[in-house]
Image (cartoon, rainbow, N blue to C red):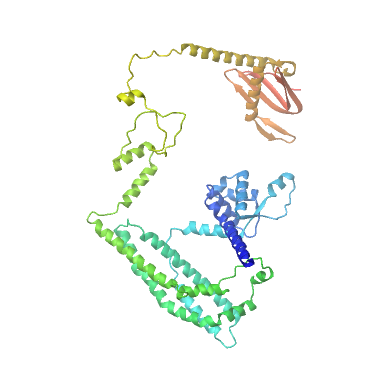
Amino acid sequence: MEGNERKTAQGEETGAGAWQRLNAYAYLSAPERLEYVAVMRVFCGTLLADLSVPDLLAKLAGTESPGAALDAETLTRRLEELVRWGNLLRSTHTVRAASITEYQRSRSRYQLSKLGERVQRDADEVLAGADAAREVSSELLALVDRGLREIATLAAAPGGADPQQALERISTLFVQFAEFAESVRDFYAYLGQVLARYDLDTAEYQGFKDLLLDYVEAITEDVSFRAPRIAAHLDSIWPHLPALLARIDAHASGIGALADALPETRVQRSRGRDSADWEGLREWFTITGGHSSQVDQLRDATLRALQSLLANAKRMLRSASGEMSRRKDLLRLAAWFDAAEPDEAHDLAVAAFGLYGARHLGVAPDPDRSVPAYVSWWTGPAVEVPVALRERGSRAPRGRAAAAEDHSAQKRRLVEQARQQAEARQAAADELRSASGRFEQVRLSAPAMRLLLELLTTALGNARLHKDAHDFLLEGAQAADADLGIRLTAWRTPGRSTVFKSVDGDLTADDLTVAVDSASGHAVGEASA
């Protein structure tokens, strides 16, 4: 029972760890993915460096990426999201600041995590060459053959292999093999993408035919020639492999000693230092465990490519008799639809497919019940059809037409109301002009106080704050109403306050002086204390 519980807990921990590591890819699918990629590229361009928000802003400002337009607040949010996903880590760097402002700007520093660097590196590789045809490094296969032969000779030597020489050859061997295997996978993935097309014209078909018959055939023949020799070298190495790896570990333990000292620390060793790496190499060239080798899968993939090429040839022969694919035409039509305005798209649909708009019964639905466009008529709410239309099929009303409603009284009432409001605002403006310079001695009416607050709010919104040698000053704190012929000007006066009295209460503005005058004249007076 304890073993089952331990296995379940370990499986849950592994699942949680996998979920956390997969979160590192979240920024690549976020709506702001281009900004995140620009930020991650700055971190990937450094080694063991922690950066603050000002540092990142300075580095992004010199690029043409979308991250150059980020402000400090938005960039901070992006960095916090990257920390939450596991791409960045909070730095423990000690902050040295000469002022509180500098400390607040520099206290949050970030550095790149190992997982974040791996994800961004893979993303950049995909963006750089995702659609390119990668050349297969077939010359590396001969180097793999030679390296295995040398390792087999060292392993079978009397007294065992020299550990340093064996380590150098094993490291070189697995780097060469990894590059070769990766180039094969990329090339055949590109080939499958191309052969899946059924719109190849004569020139494209001729080019891909030469590619298959010449290049792919050369790759397959080279692999078929080298595979038996590589498999034979692996068979001769296999009995000596455990002792050889143990000898290398005793000579150069490397970072593997960290795993022995700290069991909770995961260590990823260089390729070729573990037996699992050799098993993967052997499975590539020989049949093990009832599974076909990668060499056999390579031959099968070549055969399927030739079959796809034959299918394209048959399609081109049928096109001569009129049976041809319309894929290119449909793609061109789709591009027209994508670039067209809504009205033009309807015209394109009619011209291309002969599909006209549906003839609907012209009965307006209830305006209070909003029904989405995707709701089916079968399940949607019913529309009440008038009795005349339902019984007689005609919208024409019967009987005498009703007289048009007279709205003249309502119009006169609205005009009078607008006139009274305009007169009240003009009276409030006159009251403010007369009270300017002695606001503390006059109690303003409610309309005058509302107009004063309105102008003061607009003036402060238009103002620009700047600092001179002694204090902060306001520039351009002014608001005017041309219809009322009034203008309010405000400026900062440290140590002085302005008090505005009204029937609704008093307002005190500290360190502020206010003047009200006519829109085209000079200030009547100042309000300050």
Residue 457 screen position, x and y as percent: 64, 26
Residue 61 screen position, x and y as percent: 58, 48
Q: Is residue 230 above or below residue 328?
A: below
Most foreground residue, 340 or 490: 340
- What residue is shown at x 50% (from left), y 69% (from top)? 178
Q: Is residue 433 above or below residue 348?
A: above
Most foreground residue, 468 or 486: 486
Most foreground residue, 515 or 26: 26
Most foreground residue, 473 or 392: 392
Left or right of 283? Residue 384 is left
- What residue is shown at x 36% (from left), y 44% (from top)? 336
Left or right of 469? Residue 447 is left
- Quarter of the rendering occupied by the C terminus: top right
Residue 317 screen position, x and y as percent: 25, 59
Answer whether residue 30 is visible to the viewer in this image: yes
Answer whether residue 215 is visible to the viewer in this image: no
Residue 316 screen position, x and y as percent: 27, 59
Furthest residue in direction right, as rendered: 495
Furthest residue in direction front, as rendered: 1
Furthest residue in direction left, as rendered: 321
Asked which quadrant contains residue 161, the reply is: bottom right
- What residue is shown at x 59% (from left), y 81% (from top)? 243
Q: Is residue 151 above or below residue 41?
A: below
Left or right of 17? Residue 379 is left
- What residue is shown at x 36% (from left), y 59% (from top)? 196
Asked which quadrant contains residue 438, the reply is: top right
Q: Is residue 513 above or below residue 219?
A: above
Figure disc tally: 0
